[in-house]
Structure formats: C-alpha cells, structure tokens
C-alpha cells in the first residue's frame, strides 16, 4: 500500500499518529501509562475512528477481567503467607553455598511466578533475599537481577503466569483460534527458563556488579549515595565558619547547592565568596552515602530542615534510632505524592525521611518536593521500637528486617486450596479461565482470606487502564487496515529468507519494543500482525503468534521493560548499563533458543 494511500485515509492516519504518540509517551515517561491508556480511548472516540461501544469494549475483555482477578488471587496468597514455604525452602536449599543459593532463588521465584503475578512475588522475596545475601557475604546486586529475570522466565511457563499470555490468548480467540490451555506453553516455557537459568548461573557472577544497600552493606565504599538536605539554624555554633571547615574534610560528602532564602547557589560552593561562609538558616543540598549523611547529622549545630520534620519532640538524639531504606511498592498510594504530602511521621510510626534515591540518579531538588515513584528508595531515620509498624504496611518494602510481616497464616491452606482449584479446573477445561478466576476471588473474600477493601486495593488500576487503552488502539489498527499493512510489510521484507526469518523478525520486534514500552502493549499490538502474517504465508498463525508471546516477555535489557526490573533497580544499587551488560547477551541466547524451539513445537507446515 503506497504512502500516499496511507496518508489519504483520515482514520488510518489518525490511528498511526495515536500509535506513534503513545509510543513516545511510553518511552519518555512524560505521563503515567494509565493516563496514556485513557488518552488513547478518548482521542480515538473524539476523532471518530471508533464508536464509543467499540472503544470501551476493552473494559469488558475476558483477558482484562482475568488479569484483574489474578491480582486479587495473588494478594490473597501473599496475605495468607502461602508463599512462605517456598521462601523457607529456598533458605534451606541455598544455605552456605553461593551457587546453590542462586539456583534455589531462581527456582523458588520462577515456580511462584508461574501462578502468581510476578511483581508481588518479587516484593515478597526481596527482603528475604537481602537477608540471605548478608549471611552469604554476597552483594544484593548479585542476586536481585537474577530474581527479577527468574520471575519473568517463570511467568512464561503457564497461561496465567503473566498478563501478556492472557492477552495473546484472547487475541487468538478473537481471530478464530482456540484459547490457549493453561499449560499449553509450559513445555517451551520450561526450555526458555532452563536456558535462562543456566546463563545466569554461569555468567551472572561475572557480569553482575557488586554493590550494596544500606541494610546489607558489604563495605563503606560500595554504599550507594543519596541526596538530602541539612540546615544550620540561627543558634548553630557553625554559623560564620566556612563550608570547607565543616563539610570539606568529611569523606563521602559532596555539597550540591546552598539554598539561602530565595537564592540558590550552585557549585563551586567552597571557593565562591557568596557561599564560602555559613549563614543563619542556610540549607545545603548534599550527596553522600548513608553513613556519611548520618555523620553530618550527628554534628552539633546541624539539623534537618523544619519541613522534613523532627523525628521526636525534645532531644531525639538520645533515642535508640536506626537508619532504614524503604522501597515504594507498586500500587502504593504514596506514588505521585511528595514527601511532605505523604505525612510519613504520622502515618508510619514516626519515620523521618531524609533522602530519596531514584534508580542511580541524584535528584537535585528539595527532598520534600520530590514526587515519589514506584521503586524509589527513601532513606529514613526511625525509632527502633517502631520497626514493626513499617514492616506491616503495604506502602513500601522495609529493607531492614524480614520477620514479623502481618499475614493470616491460619488461612494459608484455604488460599492455597482455592488457587489449586482454579488451576486444576482451568487445566481440565471445565470453565473459561475468566470465570474460574472470578470464582476464586469470590472464595477468597467469602472465606475471609482477603477482606473486600484489600481486594479492591490489590487491583493495579494503572495496568487495567493501560490494557483497556491498548485494546482500543489494537481494534483501531485492525479496523483501519493498518494491521494488514504491517503484516504485508513484514512478509514482503522477510519471506524471501524463509519462514524462520519471519519468526525471527517478529520475535526481535517484540523484544525491542518490550524493552521500551509495556509488554502488555506489545502483545496487544503485535498479536494481530503475527496472526495476519501466518495466514498470509499459509503456515497458520501459531508459530508467529508464539514468537510474539515469548518475544514480548524478553524484557531483560532495560529496567523499564518490566515492572520487576524497575522495582529491584534501587535496592540493588544498579545502573542502567548493568541491565545492558547482562540483559543483552541473555536476550541473544533466548532469541537463538526461540528460533529452534518455536518451529519444533509448532511446525512450519503449509496449511490447506
């Protein structure tokens, strides 16, 4: 189809602009993914590309309903402590041996992720892994990426292991194929998982960095750096002295700016005559390791600014306090709120946040003005007697201490039984997975495994809105003929090289896109293209469909490709290049595996 014909069709042009705009918003993270989903629906309706009934049909999608129900089932299993047996087994199996520890970790996480949403599994295992890393003298950074990757690989082994699989299955149904069975992809999924585990066990120790978190620091020089602020009050004996005297000789401290009333002074601070001497109420934004920050706060005449709040009334330095890291959970109501707006002290047992780390970047703004995101690490000072309060909140993961999590252990057998029934009935094909998942949710609530308020909270609405928006965009791509156009381009470009080359092209396209945008978006957009390609070439859609399924789960090369990768970014002290160093070769190995496994399981035989 000529470019002029494409541009002449108004609906097709609008749909293409919406697609490109959504991709740009996903990559730049200008707005959140749920907002992107809503914008897609609204624009397609206002532009007349889709009728309201068609644009909103995604909200009644069986796949979307199943995904939302699986969030609730996962929350019930976790609240009942049904995964604790796996974590205890991992501890026993990996005790005293680093190689055994890595294998036990990956197996435990993968098995859990095959039946439970990946992100909650990683949230549950995170503090356990940090504690074991300390016992084995391992840096957390050597275990957390393997844990995230294992959750992704485990999720590819069953239909309910990841929302991507459910979306591919629904799209297949809409195009006249049978729905995928719950264990239909288990065979090839296990091959991918074994290959991935072998790669991580053999090359992970060499490719992964050795960095520490606050709670499991291996050495002071490996500690990560946070940005925080300090204040010199009017009564401080340090007023009038130079910054060189007070901060210049402190190891691990780097002043970033001086905030003096309405004025902001940037480096160089020590040699600048305007900021050489400390004045009353000066606020200094500085960067440093937690230990170095603590040393500064212990100096006489140095305080946290009033807006950060005081930890205790009176002489707080006489209290038994500790410094902890709090990682913001996915779905936490703190996401999008500032430190000031979150009211940490009142809500979370007098925790005083003093710094924030976002991935490996130093945020040059006032601590209280930082809007929190999923995976941000908040450095806080807290009364040791109130640590239990922090462990028992679902807003973040406390990286110091792994005991005392509030669960309904008496309900663990009930929660496990409900999940087993859902999986068994789905495997036998007695009822659609959407009905079984909803029945499981009802049983979780009726048996008091999970109260209704927590069930509502368990559903990640950002995922729901994103999927609904992408389903609307997928429908627009099909109705305007853009899906066939993309399929035609793939076939014309790669068909001379053979069907394996076309499978390779689809897999690579899915893997590249999923490293930049949501894997759910990739599944919705590429599945119709893959089906059209298979039908056009005469081989049937199955091999090309599964190239999308496995390619969309190949989220290893960047932290943005999958939520679990982003979640371990802060606790592991990783940098963006760490994911490239280990994720790119893993992607290459799994790509080579896909080229052989997919045609072997789903043969390339001409139909009819």
Image: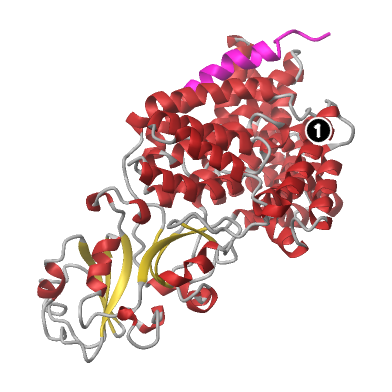
Could you say which quadrant of the image residue 1 lies in? top right
Question: In this rendering, does residue 544 appear at all?
Answer: yes
Q: Which quarter of the rendering shows the C terminus?
A: top right
Marks counted in the figure total 1
Residue furthest bottom in the image: 235
498 shown above or below 353: above
Question: In this rendering, does residue 70 appear at all?
Answer: no
Residue 425 lies in the magenta stretch: no
Side (left or right) of 445 relative to 275: right
Side (left or right) of 96 relative to 375: left
The residue that mark 1 highlights is 424
Residue furthest right in the image: 430
- How far from the left and from the top, in percent, is residue 299? 20, 76
Residue 602 lies in the magenta stretch: yes
Q: Main secondary structure of the magenta part?
A: helix
- Badge 1: how crowded within 10 Å, few (<14), some, or many (20+)? some
- How far from the left and from the top, in percent, is residue 468? 74, 49
Q: Nearer the viewer, residue 353 or 83?
A: 83
Side (left or right) of 273 relative to 422: left
22 shown above or below 95: below
| Residue visible at 77% across and 19% down in the picture | 535
Q: Nearer the viewer, residue 343 or 471?
A: 343
Q: Describe the element under mark 1 as helix, strand or loop.
A: helix
Magenta segment:
589-608
86 shown above or below 385: above
| Residue visible at 24% across and 64% down in the picture | 292
- How far from the left and from the top, in percent, is residue 194? 54, 22
- How far from the left and from the top, in percent, is residue 424? 81, 33
Q: Nearer the viewer, residue 542 or 459?
A: 459
Could you say which quadrant of the image residue 305 lies in? bottom left
């Amino acid at each position: 189809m000529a470019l002029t014909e494409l541009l002449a069709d108004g609906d097709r042009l609008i749909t293409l602009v919406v697609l490109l705009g959504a991709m740009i918003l996903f990559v730049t993270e200008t707005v959140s993914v749920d907002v992107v989903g809503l914008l897609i629906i609204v624009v397609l309706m206002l532009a007349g590309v889709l009728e309201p009934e068609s644009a909103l049909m995604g909200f009644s999608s069986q796949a979307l309903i199943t995904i939302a129900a699986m969030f609730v089932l996962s929350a019930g299993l976790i609240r009942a402590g049904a995964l604790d047996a796996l974590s205890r087994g991992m501890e026993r199996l990996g005790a005293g041996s680093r190689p055994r520890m890595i294998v036990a970790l990956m197996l435990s996480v993968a098995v859990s992720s095959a039946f439970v949403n990946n992100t909650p599994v990683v949230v549950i295992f995170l503090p356990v892994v940090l504690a074991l890393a300390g016992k084995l003298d391992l840096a957390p950074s050597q275990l957390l990426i393997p844990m995230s990757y294992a959750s992704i690989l485990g999720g590819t082994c069953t239909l309910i292991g990841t929302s991507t699989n459910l979306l591919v299955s629904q799209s297949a149904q809409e195009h006249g194929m049978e729905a995928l069975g719950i264990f239909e992809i288990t065979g090839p999924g296990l091959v991918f998982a074994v290959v991935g585990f072998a790669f991580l066990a053999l090359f992970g120790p060499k490719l992964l960095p050795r960095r520490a978190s606050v709670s499991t620091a291996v050495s002071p020089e490996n500690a990560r750096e946070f940005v925080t602020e300090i204040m010199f009050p009017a009564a401080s004996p340090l007023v009038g002295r130079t910054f060189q005297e007070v901060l210049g000789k402190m190891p691990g401290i780097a002043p970033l700016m001086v905030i003096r009333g309405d004025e902001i002074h940037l480096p160089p601070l020590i040699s600048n005559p305007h900021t050489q001497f400390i004045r009353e109420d000066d606020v200094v934004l500085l960067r440093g390791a937690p230990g170095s920050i603590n040393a500064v706060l212990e100096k006489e005449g140095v305080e946290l600014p009033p807006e950060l709040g005081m930890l205790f009334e009176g002489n707080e330095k006489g209290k038994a306090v500790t410094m902890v890291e709090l990682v913001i959970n996915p779905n936490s109501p703190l996401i999008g709120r500032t430190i000031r707006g979150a009211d940490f002290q009142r809500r979370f047992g007098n925790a005083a946040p003093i710094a924030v780390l976002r991935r490996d970047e130093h945020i040059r703004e006032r601590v209280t003005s930082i809007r929190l995101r999923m995976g941000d690490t908040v450095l806080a000072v807290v009364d040791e007697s109130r640590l239990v309060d922090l462990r028992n909140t679902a807003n973040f993961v406390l990286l110091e201490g792994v005991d005392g999590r509030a669960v309904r252990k008496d309900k663990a057998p009930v929660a496990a039984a409900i999940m087993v029934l859902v999986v068994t009935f789905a495997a036998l094909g007695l009822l659609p997975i959407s009905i079984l998942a909803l029945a499981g949710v009802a049983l979780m609530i009726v048996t008091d495994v999970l109260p209704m308020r927590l069930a509502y909270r368990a559903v990640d609405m950002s995922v729901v809105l994103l999927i609904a928006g992408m389903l609307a965009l997928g429908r627009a791509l099909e109705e305007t003929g853009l899906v066939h156009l993309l399929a035609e381009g793939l076939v014309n470009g790669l068909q001379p090289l053979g069907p394996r080359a076309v499978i390779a092209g689809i897999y690579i396209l899915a893997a590249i896109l999923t490293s930049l945008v949501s894997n759910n978006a990739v599944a919705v957009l590429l599945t119709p293209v893959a089906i059209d390609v298979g039908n056009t070439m005469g081989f049937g859609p199955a091999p090309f469909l599964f190239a999308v399924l496995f390619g969309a789960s190949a989220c290893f090369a960047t932290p943005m490709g999958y939520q679990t990768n982003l979640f371990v970014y802060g606790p592991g002290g990783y940098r963006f290049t760490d994911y490239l160093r280990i994720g790119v070769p893993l992607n290459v190995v799994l790509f080579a595996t896909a080229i052989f496994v997919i045609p072997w399981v789903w043969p390339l035989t001409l139909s009819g």
